[in-house]
């Protein structure tokens, strides 16, 4: 992959494994993971105005408005650690966000090299939501059944406390899935038409999905 094009994005429904795979891929590529959901959760934890605004939407399972989201991601992408690129996790999620991302990247003389679309059937997504636990300090995802921590309730990476996300309740998960279909899934065609979409079957073991993603990235 050319050095100037190390901007990648992971696209997929809630619980498709974007965060799990992003954590592995950033280690491999040596670029930071930029998760819009994690940025919002950091803002909520720090009780910033942006966090208070975002929380209203996130608790309902709706998308945070584009102007808020785009401004936050733009600021993050302009920090020094993104000079060599970044792996976007959960952004863009609407066509206006995708267009804004193009502009942001043109501004730093770059473009999106690849969008990895992770596909998982809906019933599997709902099962994953129920068992997910997240580290309060580093944000690492675990699953009680499919990817448990070594010691119950404790993060393998940094010993942080594991918790269940507010929006992983069944009714909010359903809303998030509907929002994905209505507002985010059109991005699959958007990026396919541009010739930078790589589709990966996310309904396999975490290691097998990681192998397929590595292969898709190596083919660039
Ligand atoms: P965000 O935090 O991005 O949530 P999401 O898209 O709903 O995705 P998740 O984080 O729930 O799932 P994931 O794909 O990362 O899966 P994970 O690896 O954790 O967004 C939250 C909210 O913020 C949104 O609802 C919205 O309000 C707002 N927001 C964020 N970005 C926005 C944007 N761009 N615009 C507007 N609003 C925005 O895996 C899930 C579980 O499954 C884990 O337990 C994991 O261990 C397990 N698992 C993973 N892979 C496998 C596998 N292969 N087999 C079995 N289990 C697996
Ligand atoms: Mg995530």
Image (cartoon, helix red, strand yellow):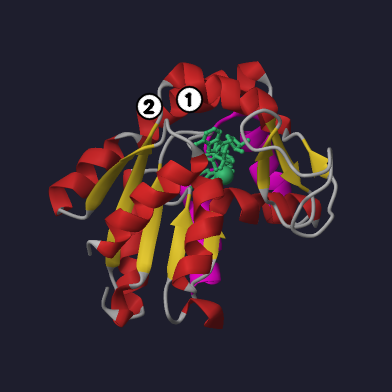
Circle 2 is placed at which residue position? 181
From what the image shows, is residue 27 above or below residue 201? below
Quick one: SS at disc 1?
Answer: helix
Work out whether residue 109 can be spotted: no
Q: Which segment did they paint magenta?
A: 51-77
The residue where tag 1 is placed is 177
Q: Nearer the viewer, residue 212 or 164?
A: 212
Left or right placement of residue 25 versus residue 61 in this view: left
Image height check: is 33 above or below 56? Answer: below
Alpha-carbon neighbours of circle 2 within 10 Å: few (<14), some, or many (≥20)?
Answer: few
Q: Quadrant of residue 216?
A: bottom left
Taking the magenta stretch, the answer to whether it contains residue 63 is yes
Q: Measured from the top left, where is residue 73 in percent x and y?
A: 51, 62
View quadrant of ligand 1: top right
Was residue 147 drawn as part of the magenta stretch in this picture?
no
Q: Is residue 149 visible?
A: yes
The answer to whether the residues at label 2 and label 1 have Cβ atoms under 8 Å apart is yes
Give the residue drawn at x 55%, y 20%: 126
Name the dominant secondary structure of the magenta segment.
helix
Tell me the quarter of the image containing the N terminus: bottom left
Q: Position of residue 120 (x, y in %)?
A: 41, 29
Q: Residue 128: which disc?
A: none
Comparing 163 with 28, the one in front is: 28
- Viewport quadrant of the C terminus: bottom left
């Amino acid at each position: 992959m050319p050095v100037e094009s190390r901007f990648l994005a992971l696209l997929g429904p809630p619980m498709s494994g974007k965060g799990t795979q992003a954590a592995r891929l950033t280690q491999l590529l040596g670029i930071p993971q930029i998760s819009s959901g994690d940025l919002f959760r950091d803002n909520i934890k720090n009780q910033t105005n942006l966090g208070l605004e975002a929380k209203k939407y996130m608790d309902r399972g709706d998308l945070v408005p584009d102007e808020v989201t785009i401004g936050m991601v733009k600021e993050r992408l302009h920090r020094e650690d993104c000079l060599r690129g970044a792996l976007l996790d959960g952004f863009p999620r609407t066509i206006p966000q995708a267009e804004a991302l193009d502009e942001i990247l043109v501004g730093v003389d770059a473009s999106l090299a690849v969008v990895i679309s992770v596909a998982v059937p809906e019933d599997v997504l709902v099962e994953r939501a129920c068992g997910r636990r997240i580290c309060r300090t580093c944000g690492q995802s675990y699953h009680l059944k499919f990817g448990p921590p070594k010691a119950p309730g404790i993060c393998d990476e940094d010993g942080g406390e594991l918790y269940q996300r507010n929006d992983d309740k069944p009714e909010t998960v359903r809303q998030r899935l509907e929002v994905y279909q209505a507002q985010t899934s059109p991005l699959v065609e958007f990026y396919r038409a541009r010739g930078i979409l790589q589709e990966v079957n996310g309904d396999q073991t975490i290691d097998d999905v990681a192998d397929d993603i590595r292969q898709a990235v190596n083919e660039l």
